[in-house]
Amino acid sequence: GMKISVLSKKLWCVHKQLLLLLAPLVFLPLLFTLPEKEGKCLYVVILMATFWCTEALPLAVTAMLPVCLFPTLGILPAKKVCPQYFIETNFLFLSGLVMASSIEEWGLHRRIALKVLSIVGVKPAWLILGMMLTSSFLSMWLSNTATTAMMLPIANAILESLFGDLETLKQKCKSPEDHDRGVINGKVMDGVEPTDARTPEEIQSESQYQMKVWKGFLICIPYAASIGGTATLTGTAPNLILIGQLKSYFPDCDLINFGSWFAFAFPLMLLFLFLAWIWISFLYGGLNTRYCRILNSYFLFYAEARARALIKEDYKKLGPINFAEGAISFFFILFAVLLFTRDPKFVTGWSVFFKKGYVSDAVTGVIIVSILFFFPSQKPSLSWWFDPKAVNTPYVPLLSWKKAQDSVPWNIILLLGGGFAMAKACEESGLASWIGGHLQPLAEVPPAVAVMLITAFLACFTEFASNTATIIIFLPVIAELAIRVSVNPLYFMIPATVGCSYAFMLPVSTPPNSIAFASGHLLVKDMVKTGFVMNILGILSVSLAMNTWGIAMFNLSTYPEWAHSINNTAAIHLSSIKSVNATL
């Protein structure tokens, strides 16, 4: 027994290295059992999927495997693989990331968060709503991870002012002993706080209730950030994978851009946020009426006054809005407005003033972001020119290249590139249509049910793999499936993309969950229990959105022209199957 445990410990130490050696060997049979080109491509795809799910290699390194393997295995020449790594979509993403880094640089996100929280008030259910609205709004523009990392300390500070410090609270949850009265009320306010006349049992049950509210607070932030990321194209990487792969697969499809995606996904985000708020408030006691009697007592009155004062105080510390913050706000709003109005399909956008098909979302984003690198961060003054005594300080723009370079997650840009390269190979090697052929039985499933199944499957898969890796792996297959069953490809591809962001069940599902979990107050079972219902609510919201305003906006009920032109081989293949079936 002893030897085995020692060996297993040693093996665990090098399990990633073993995986790197064994996975290529285990999947070797694929090369010999499938048609040659498809087999080679599937080999690389499954290898990459394995490395992404197990993180045996850093995500960005796995994303570079297409450069190593597609040319050497004769699937795609290097001159076709490499340009996939920085296509137009990456520029749109990059502009979003740079915009976010300037917002973070000048602390605008903190100002927005504290402002919203001071408006919603400090009753538990309302505070949770305020937290969720703020997190989701910020994560539309910042990365989900950055949003969560910024919101958690704010949440903790508010909770401490409401319920005193956490360790004391944990103690009081355990045993109904008579604790020192002074501790219960945290800070005694000017001696006007009355003495506590509650029994130890009441104190314990109230402490347990407060502990629940505390957990609800922490868990709602990463969830709201994940939901918010789905609302804009640049909000999270999977949305960009969708648009990049669409351009590659269906060059004639121009239905999805920043404006049209927002018009579809923003109402969906609001719907899901509302359902999530009801669920989290219900589960963590925000809507609990049993305690209202106690909570309206003097005790909570003081606690709420303290929390309100804290939010006010924190906002005051930021000082008045300075020139730089005003300028960033202006460019941020301009960035959003120009992207929304370029070509939102339901009205004519400003792109009609330019040569048709020349100016895209990426162009718009990069133009605005470039301005940040030379626009002044101090108010320019005329008197400075004429005053010989004025201090000649160096000129500081809103954003320095160094800051942008440090804060942009370049690994995600490589990850996008790896995804586009992989999709290209799936298409060119015929792997996508080969898989599509094997999904023929699914043609019997009604499309509306298929949407729910696809969303559910990806929402489950993404719990164990990175959101971006999940969509990279499955989107080509889903596109192919749609062509096989003659359904508008967007009808399957959009729900799949949104479903990938619904990683709610495990701390490892997505970085925001890990950050919230690392605070140490949440248990895995809290996340699994809350997240399971969140997933179901998400799947229902997506189905509703797709089958109501989604169908109307993207004209999903018809099989589009742009899907006909592609994959003539698949179409011919399909018609031959149909004719064979007819003769049978």
Image (cartoon, rainbow, N blue to C red):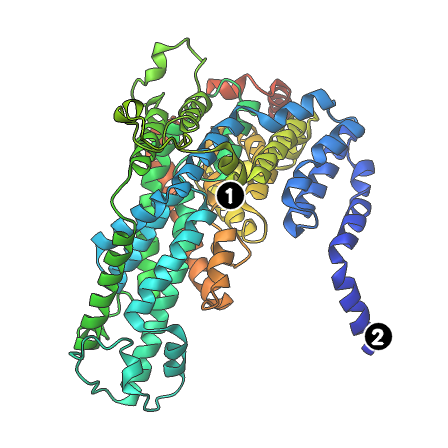
- Residue 406 drawn above or below residue 185: above
Figure quadrant of residue 4? bottom right
Q: Which mark is residue 3?
A: 2
On the question of residue 240 being in view, the answer is yes
Give the alpha-carbon distance from disc 2 to disc 1, as whole Å: 45 Å
In front of the other: label 2 or label 1?
2
Residue 431, placed above or below residue 50: above
Q: Is residue 490 left or right of residue 8?
A: left
- Pointer 1: what residue? 454
Callout 2 secondary element: helix
Judge by depth and name the residue closer to the eye, 61 or 328: 328
User: Where residue 56 sits in the image (x, y, percent)?
Assistant: 70, 50
**Is 333 in front, or is 71?**
333
Residue drawn 26% across and 69% down?
288
Quadrant holding the N terminus: bottom right
Residue 455 is situated, as x and y percent measured from the top left of the image, at 48, 44
Circles 2 and 1, Cβ within 8 Å, touching? The answer is: no
The crowding category of the residue bearing disc 1, from other C-alpha atoms within 10 Å (few below 14, some 14 to 19, many at least 20), is many
Q: Amino acid at mark 2?
A: Lys
Q: Is residue 58 above or below residue 578?
A: below
Q: Helix, strand, or loop for circle 1? A: helix
Of mark 2 and mark 1, the one earlier in the sequence is 2
Does residue 555 appear left or right of residue 81 in this picture?
A: left
Amino acid carrying mark 1 in the image: Ile
| Mark 2, other Cα within 10 Å: few <14 / some 14–19 / many ≥20 | few
Residue 377 image offset from top left, x and y in percent: 36, 33
